[in-house]
Structure formats: structure tokens, C-alpha cells
Image (cartoon, rainbow, N blue to C red):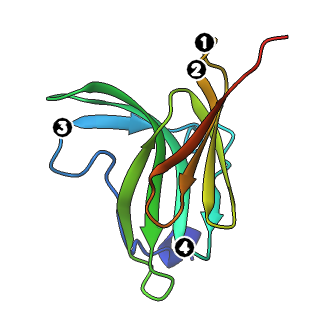
Amino acid sequence: MNPDDSIEQISTVYIPSRNVEGYATSPVLEPRTGHRAFTLDTRHHYMLIPVTGYLARSEGQFSGVAVISYDPTSGKLGLKAILEHENVLRTLYIGDVIYTVASQNPPGMPMVKAFDAETLKLINQYAAVSS
């Protein structure tokens, strides 16, 4: 028996949404150079995946974290939001706060952003301090 025969696709998420022309990539999904690390928030039923992409008809490029909701019973997935943060590489959460961490940004740009896990609104941002 082929191992792939036992795998069943339950749900699909499109980033950006299915009816918007564009594309997205993620270091999580890059097979050769990607770090393959994403954050799973079991309390809020979120997967947090860093993404960058392009929207063909509107703003152009975007960068941030795709907040993908999941139903633990059915396995259904949905794109809840994209938390905007340029050059984001990692995410984490503590309690009801989601933190996004950028790999590097120009001076004065935020290295860490904090978002409310319930509303997904920006709470605060922190820039690197030069020494």
C-alpha cells in the first residue's frame, strides 16, 4: 500500500483568498531552505504562518502572518486575517497576545509587533534599539 493512499485532503486555504489574483509564499512551506516552523495556538484554534505575497489588482506586495483558523472536530480551515508586518520570520503567543518577530528591518521599523488574539488588532510595536 502506498502511504499517500491513506492521506485525505480535508480542507484548503487560499492566500490571498480564492477570488483574488495574486500569490503568497512562506518560509514554513519552502522545501529546501524553509525553517518549517509555525505556531499552533490550540486555545484560539489558530495556525500562524509567516507569508509574503503579491496582490495583482490592488496594493501590490504584502508581508505578515496568515492567521488560519481551524475546527478541531471537522479539520476545516479558513483564512481569518493577515497580520501586517514586514520581514516577519517567526510568531509566538503568550496568553491572549500574538507576537510577530521580524528577521531584520531598517532602523526605526518595528522588530516585534503585538496583536490581540481575540480581535487580531495591533496592540503595540517595538523597534530595535541601536547601541
Helix, strand, or loop for circle 3?
loop
Q: Do the residues under discs 2 and 1 have CB atoms within 8 angstroms?
A: yes
The earlier-in-sequence mark between 4 and 2 is: 4
- Residue 100 in the image: state x and y as whole percent: 61, 43
What amino acid type is highlighted by mark number 4?
A: His
Residue under label 4: 44
- 68 left or right of 103? left
CA–CA distance in space, label 4 to label 2? 28 Å
CA–CA distance in space, label 3 to label 1? 30 Å
Using a 10 Å C-alpha cutoff, classify the residue at mark 3 as few (fewer than 14 neighbours), some (14 to 19) or many (20 or more): few
Q: Do the residues under discs 4 and 2 have CB atoms within 8 angstroms?
A: no
- Residue 109's tag is 2
Residue under label 3: 21
Q: Residue at x 85, y 10 (%)?
A: 131
The earlier-in-sequence mark between 4 and 3 is: 3
CA–CA distance in space, label 1 to label 4? 32 Å
Residue under label 1: 106
